[in-house]
Image (tube, coloured by chain):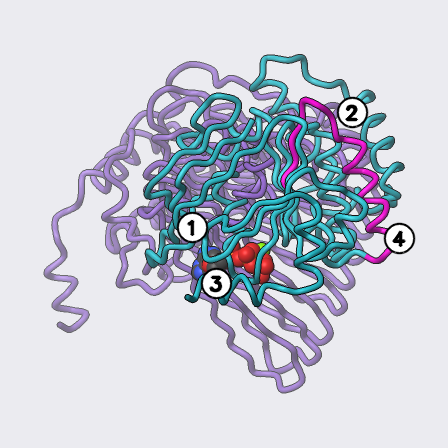
Chain colours: A cyan, B purple
Amino acid sequence: MLEIKNLHARIAEDGTEILRGLNLSIAAGEVAAIMGPNGSGKSTLSYVLAGREDYEVTEGEVWYKGENILELDPAERAAKGLFLAFQYPVEIPGVATMQFLKTALNEQKKARGEAELTTPEFMRQVKQAAGELKINPDMLKRPLNVGFSGGEKKRAEILQMALLAPQLCLLDETDSGLDIDALKIVADGVNALRSPERAMVVITHYQRLLDYIVPDTVHVLYRGQVVQTGDKDLARELERNGYADLIEQHAA
Amino acid sequence: MSDHAEKNARPPATAAETSVFDSYDARIDALPGSSAVRRMRDRLMSELQDQRLPHRRMEAWHYTDLRTLLKAVPEAFGTGGEAKGVAPLVDGSNVLTVNNGEASVEGAPEGVSVSRFADRLNDESVVEFLAAQGPEDAVSRINGAFVSDGLVVDVAPGTVLDAPLEIQAVHSTGQAHTRFPVTIGKGAKGSIVERQCASGEGAAFTSSITDLTVGDDAEIDWIILQEQGDADTHLARVNLRLGANAKLMLYVVNAGGKLVRQEVRAVVEGEGSDFKLRGINLLGGESHTDVTMVLDHTVPSTTSTEVLRNVVFGKAHGVFQGQIRVAQAAQQTDAQMACNTLLLSDDADFSAKPELEIFADDVQCGHGATVADIDKNHLFYLMSRGIPAARARGMLVYAFLAEVVEELDDERLVPALESVIAEWLRANG
Ligand SMILES: Nc1ncnc2c1ncn2[C@@H]1O[C@H](COP(=O)(O)OP(=O)(O)OP(=O)(O)O)[C@@H](O)[C@H]1O
Ligand SMILES: [Mg+2]
């Protein structure tokens, strides 16, 4: 479903290279965990996949469902089923949450040539998804993410994901900022979306999340490259020993 | 160069000035009014001929050099046939119209009495009313010289307007000059919409003055929606006074015109009164739009806030000049002014000039101005959810205005204004 080949990307503004020849391949139905030290390029990878302009791809390819998506803008990628749950969701004053959700949903449907949702049907879906994620409906009356607590923002990201029903989900540290109960709720939400047609990339620092969302593969990112790939046991090993060995290896 | 030398060295009249002077000569005999009014019109025109159109060396016109910006003035009046009326902003409004500078008194609701300004021009008492307020008051000179009609509106004390009252000044092409003396009686409440709009294909040159006297305890939202055509020049002025404990929100929406000057001359002279100026400037193309306010607080314990939100696309240029003067007697005045601009192109530009003149010592006054572009993190976030760039940008522009839109007291006006903004963005964004 996703095939990343020799991806190089730099910060557009100052030319600093962050991703340096990254290779990664993820099959439909797969849940892949990405781990790696702070600053190794995990969020950058997720942004480059989503199409953020601040980064410039200088080399390499990204194939998604058989299409090289690097030429598409973020909205086009989203309409093709790519979704990024942000590490730091932004607050947007003046944009009503419900209006935003409805616009996003219907714009995606429009782009795919599907019928738009009626308001009652939309309301029903939001209510159901919010209920499952234990999101207080009053929160949805506020402007987008404005004044949401850290944990509420993460839950709202998963709510969006549930509504938009994407095919490739990138979750960037969705566990950070969540209390133990919320972690369980969010993990249940993510697990409910697991399906043979859907792939997930779960970026995290902690085994705790992977206890709930058990990955098929684990990849370690370091200095803009995938330096190690394994199964769920690799995550446990990293939890025990940290990245010291790895860093030493690469320093040598 | 001395004043005298400058006067002698006055450059030849511009094409626009010549058209203004010539059209006066051609028009004057057809204009209504007593002989005293005729003398006043002649005086205003000769002052204008002396001074010419205002230019950047006049302080009040520093950012809007009318002599340079105004390239041509159509000499005909109300041509292009009957102007097309427009649907009221809010369904069920009571609508009064002035069509191509000719008023009709039909349509007033209970508690509101209406007469034609053309009739008032036969009344001696109107003469001083037409005079200009100082040497830089070109808008009153032009309007006073040419005004053909308008509506005199009296809202009886205690009246509560349960639907908005909408006054439409519509015109096709050519010149149209209107005047609206309005008196709001004690304790009256409601929303009044003033539409300034064009339906013609060609260029228009319009002026309009509203004189608004708000009685004690009255609570009024006065919304000016200016939607002149792409080639039109519109010169407007609101003279307003607030009585004791009166509340007035003057809400100016500029969404059209090529060259627009909207002046606000406000006198907060009733104790306990509150004045609000809200401005939404939607600017695009190569237009030039200027909102200039002079506000006097003359008595103790009054408040005012001014909030302008400007959205500037293309090569448009916007101006806000806000001068607040607090008299020595006006203790406990609280006056706050903010001017926020969203610049959406490299060639767009907005000049803000706040000015506070404070002679009382126990007051709270402040002002602030910001200029920004759309936040690209916000844009990315919306687009990452599948919202295409243009739509996402529109949502963010609206978000920038939302706070001010929601201040309208009549809930029916909020969606109406939202659709004006959405439509403008579709055409210009
Ligand atoms: N827009 C940017 N401007 C400047 N530096 C950036 C930018 N984006 C990323 N970087 C830098 O690139 C490196 C990789 O950042 P990135 O956010 O991808 O790391 P990460 O692996 O997600 O880290 P963390 O685990 O802390 O979230 C860091 O050194 C970061 O400071
Ligand atoms: Mg990160």
- Indicate which label's residue lies in the foreground, 4 or 3: 3
The vertical placement of B220 against B107, above or below, is below
Q: Which residue is drawn at 56% across and 43% down?
A: B396
Residue at disc 2, secondary structure = helix
Magenta stretch containing residue A200, yes or no?
A: yes
Q: Residue A181 carries which label?
A: 4
Q: Is residue B336 left or right of residue A123?
A: left
Q: Name the residue under label 2.
A: A122
The vertical placement of A181 against B119, above or below, is below
Q: Mark 3 points at which residue?
A: A249
Instruction: Please name the amino acid that badge 3 sits on.
Output: Gln
Q: How far apart are marks 2 and 1 (CA)?
A: 39 Å
Chain of the residue under the numbered disc 2 shown in the image? A
Q: Distance between the residues labelled 1 and 4?
A: 35 Å
Look at the image and tell me whether residue B119 can be seen: yes
- Indicate which label's residue lies in the foreground, 1 or 4: 1
